[in-house]
Amino acid sequence: MSLNYILKRLAVMIPVFLMVVTLVFFMIRFAPGGPFDSEKAVSPEIMRNLLAKYHMDAPLWKQYLRYLNDLAHFDLGPSFKYANRTVNELIGESFPVSIELGMLSLAWALVIGILAGALAALRPNTLWDYIPMSFSILGICLPTFVIGPGLALAFGLWYDWLPVAGWSSWQHKVLPSLTLGLAYSAFISRLTRGGLIEILNQDFIRTARAKGLSETTVMVKHAFRGGLLPVVSYLGPALAGIITGALVTETIFNIPGLGRFFIQSAVNRDYTVVMGTSLLYFGLIFVSNFFVDILYAWLDPRVRYD
Amino acid sequence: MKLFLILSLVWSGLTLAALEQTLRWGNGAEVKDLDPSIVTGVPEHHILTNLFEGLVGKHPETLGPVPGVAESWTISKDLKTYTFQLRKDAKWSNGDPVTANDFIYSWQRLLDPKTAAEYSYQAYYIKNGKDINTGKIKDFNQLGVKAPTDRTLVVTLENPTPFFLKLLDHYSLAPLHAKTIQKHGIRWTRPENMVNNGAFTLDKWETNRLISVKANPLYWDAKSVKLTSATFYPVEKMDTEEKMFRSGDLDITNEIPLEKIPLWKKKKGSDYVGSPYLGTYFYWFNTKVKPLDKKEVRQALSLAIDRDSIVKYVTKGDQPPARSFTPPGAGDNYQPPAVLPTDLSRLAEAKELLAKAGYPNGKGMPTIDILFNTHDGHKKIAEVIQEMWKKNLGVNATLVNQEWKVYLDSVRLMKFTAARQGWIGDYNDPNTFLDMFISDSPMNRSGWKNAEYDALMVKAAKELDSKKRLAHFFNAEKIWLDEMPSMPIYVYTRNYLKNKKVQGWYSNIEDLHPLKYVWIGDSK
């Protein structure tokens, strides 16, 4: 891992970032309807004043340059829909929630996925394999909008153990993170199983066992390190996917996360929020892939970036 | 001993719960803001009604006027000058007295073109209000409102406006604390900055999570406020809301999923509430395009839908079928001409009308596009109407669904043959429905123009005698129902769940629930 490589990756990011800014900026502007269209007829005078207030009366290229300039100062502008609130503020409030939900979900996904996958890999083609793997197929097939309300019904209403919606105490966080994590745990268990079975048949594992190492040491020190590589490479997209794709879970459990803004802003034509959330997601995907590449090199001595 | 301890703990918990006067209310969506001059929506209305008090309030049971900041008022003979006497003990939440100038400041701010308030037309009834808002008059002092003393407010109107008192409880016309707004700018609505004069003050505001208010000790009528606090939860998903209600996390929901209504109704002593609302669900007819340019076609289409079946099998929320355009109860003593059939009893007439228009049994009639915004409920209604027209008249229709903002654009530009629309009255008077169809009204998307109708509406606006005024509305609506520039389908209802512990909560046509009157307690 050279510094050179990191710098190269970062340098590539800048033109891509600018491209994303430009694309999103113009695409959302060209969609029919605007942020101030409403069911009530807005008189031309009020419309003019509204447009002036948000500098939307200027030609589009001027607005674009203005946006770039603000962006360079880390100012994402005012929200059109949520008057008197800035995009920085909205993201500042909701992004930590999304991160927390994402991290908790990922924790569930890893714990459940790796345990189930390892169990299956150690006793392939037995019930220890079939049962967890059947559940993982179920987990892949069932969408969150089925699992979520199901879990809420079971643990929130039938057994009154956990709250059905909201986001304040730790109890609130169990069901949503489990809902979101389950789908990913299904993938992870299959990746783990595949990776481990392949590794366990390799010569160096046999050598390790022949040396008289305990089974635990063989598994933890030798098999996992290589066997979990597929899982690690999946982590980047998974993390980005969990954080950006939490919309359904956020709506079901009424969680004040970023996903709701991401979708609602497009529906509301809240241009600045569309831009802000899209750019954030772009950054997120980029950064998570970047870290996975680094982690990958560290785990697998054969992988080297120059 | 142990048991005793547990019991006493449980007991103290119970008494605490009994004393805790707090209401948890599902409030639909996150508010746009809490600035009374800026916002327009229903979630904002629920909250602002409790934070700001106008000159005159409304009692939720009768909707009749009750004194607010004004303790009394006189109205001139020509119904154009209102003199309000402000109460001495009306205070802002920081202790300042509420003065007549606070109203003038608020109304000037609402009308200031720079504020770009979408609800500015609420102040158009005041003399020169519209001209100030549209920039024709630059001097704000020309607005028809004066404060001869700190406790006297004299308002001059453009026209006699019999419903003016009914507008005054609306948050857009509430007083504002100028110093707070000048000091904090756009951040004045944050809990740490807000200064307000209602029965409650803003306690917490967490985006997409909750907004909570607590009783205002400085409110002039604080002694009659029983709740100590209330929390508004922005829950967008109806299913989630219903689950929160069932698990005891909400006392009132905003809505209820359609398919759950029959289940909730069946329950004994049900928590379900279905009450009529001041709104009509209807289809615009584009009178500029074939075949809807012919009055007979519009009449036939309207006679050929079975409104009873639509409300019974499709909307299912106790909606009354529409028999006129203005919903029943719009305005004191107004009885709209209820001429639309609720079933297919006049189908023969519809067929004759269609034949007369040159399309016997629908032959040769161009296809009608029904435009609606993407939504399951609108789609189901459109499908049923499409089927009814086909079966009853032989008329073909196609369904066109568009995403919300695209749909708004199409409706505004009249790019449709028929299009769905819901209209909720801004105030409780037939005018808020009928003035949409005046020829030059910006809301009129039917393209329909009728000189006789316009003349009657002008007469009604100038009429001092309330009986005669309503007669003008009645005659105008009769013309409307004969001409059918739109097709009323049903009257809106509010359908939600309410815990029986919530007392002092009245169902009313304006869906108005000032929490000042609400408390938590056993019904008996």
Image (cartoon, coloured by chain):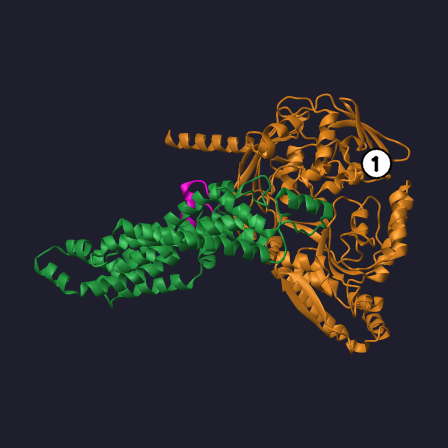
Nearest the viewer among A93 and B69 is A93
Residue visible at 17% across and 65% down in the picture: A202
Q: Position of residue B83 (x, y in %)?
A: 82, 28
Q: Is residue B439 left or right of residue B379?
A: right
- Give the letter of the chain under mark 1: B
The chain coloured orange in the image? B
Q: Position of residue B523 (x, y in %)?
A: 63, 38
Q: In the rendered structure, which segment of residues is drawn in magenta?
A: A161-176
Q: Colour of chain A?
A: green
Q: Position of residue B229 (x, y in %)?
A: 57, 33
Badge 1 marks a residue whose secondary structure is loop
Q: Is residue A200 left or right of residue B484?
A: left
Q: Where's the C terminus of chain B, which quadrant? A: top right
Q: Amino acid at mark 1?
A: Leu
Determine if residue B135 is in view: yes
- In the orientation shown, which residue stands out farthest toward the left? A211
Q: Identify whether A41 is placed above or below B391.
A: above
Quarter assignment of residue B285:
bottom right
Nearest the viewer among A199 and B50 is A199
Task: Find out whether residue A168 is within the magenta segment.
Answer: yes
The residue indicated by pointer 1 is B157
Residue visible at 87% across and 44% down in the picture: B461
Q: Identify whether B437 is placed above or below B306.
A: above
